[in-house]
Image: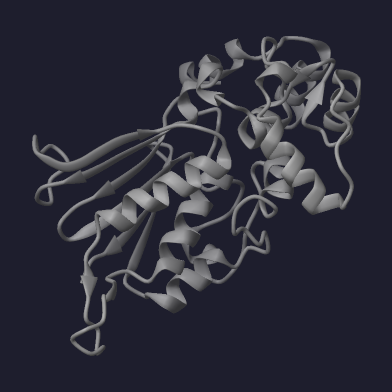
Amino acid sequence: MTRDQLNLRELLTKGEDTRTQFKENINNVDQTIFKNASFKDIDLALFKQFHLKKYDIPVEETEEGLSQTFEDMNLASGGRLTLAGLLLFGKNPMKYLPISQIIAVSFLGNDITGREYRDSENIEGNLKKLYTDALAFMKRNLKKIQNGQDFNSVGVLEIPPPVLDELLINALIHRDYFISSNIRVLIFDNRIEIISPGKLPNNLTVEKIKRGMSVKRNNTLASFAFDLIPYRGVGSGILRALQHYPDIEFIDDADLEQFKAIIKRP
């Protein structure tokens, strides 16, 4: 493991279950356990809403009931939340996992080293809040164009919203939590960059994902995400983004251990 990977490992318990997961299932880090994250860290209102929608029964709100429910869902073990449990339903995941935030900047110009920006935000919260706030950041920093509509229309977003949806969700669900870095959403005058920590897993390549192939890195996180955000989980997100807007470049950078989606602005 690299030094950055060890940074995350130090945050997790070192019990037998966790050691086994790190040794035998390195791509399933979302089931590892945070030794100090307990049920007091849950956004109970969000979890109650989720549970009723998914299972059509109210959740048992006692600590014993919550513990059993979370353990049955692989979101907790021994009264401690897993990474997936914390990211999906935590009130403040940043408290235990600083790399869970999104760094968002709208620059003046096209240079990442530029010293001027229009808008900047460190976006924090659970998966649903990260998605909602990052999407709002992008939309408020992009132009609305007439696009053939009459003069009295309010215009349409310069980049089709489904493109922003799919690429943001891809970064949130499939990032590598062994990498000590945040997701970054960078808006320039000529492009948008969505940068996700972690290169493509296994034998995936850019050409393969453009043909609809996928490998889930965070299985537990992915299995419950579609009840919280517009995630389908069938591996077609990249294809849908390209169908809506073909002018997207994907870079799988093995040296920097990051995956970058670059959306060219019109």
Q: Residue at x 73, y 30 (%)?
A: 31
30 versus 238 height, above or below: above
Q: Camera-side residue: 160 or 23?
A: 160
Quarter of the figure with the N terminus: top right
Most extreme residue toward the front, as rendered? Answer: 152
Q: Residue at x 82, y 33 (%)?
A: 74
Count up the numbered dots.
Answer: 0
- Could you say where residue 159 lies in the image, as x and y percent from the top left? 32, 69
- Could you say where residue 126 lies in the image, as x and y percent from the top left? 56, 35
Q: Residue at x 72, y 16 (%)?
A: 38
53 lies left or right of 239: right
Q: Can residue 1 be seen?
A: yes
- Could you say where residue 91 lies in the image, as x and y percent from the top left? 59, 27
Q: Camera-side residue: 96 or 146?
A: 146
Q: Camera-side residue: 110 or 51?
A: 51
49 lies left or right of 181: right
- Could you say where residue 56 lies in the image, as x and y percent from the top left? 87, 52
To which quarter of the image does residue 78 belong? top right
Q: Camera-side residue: 44 or 3?
A: 44
Q: Can residue 29 be seen?
A: no
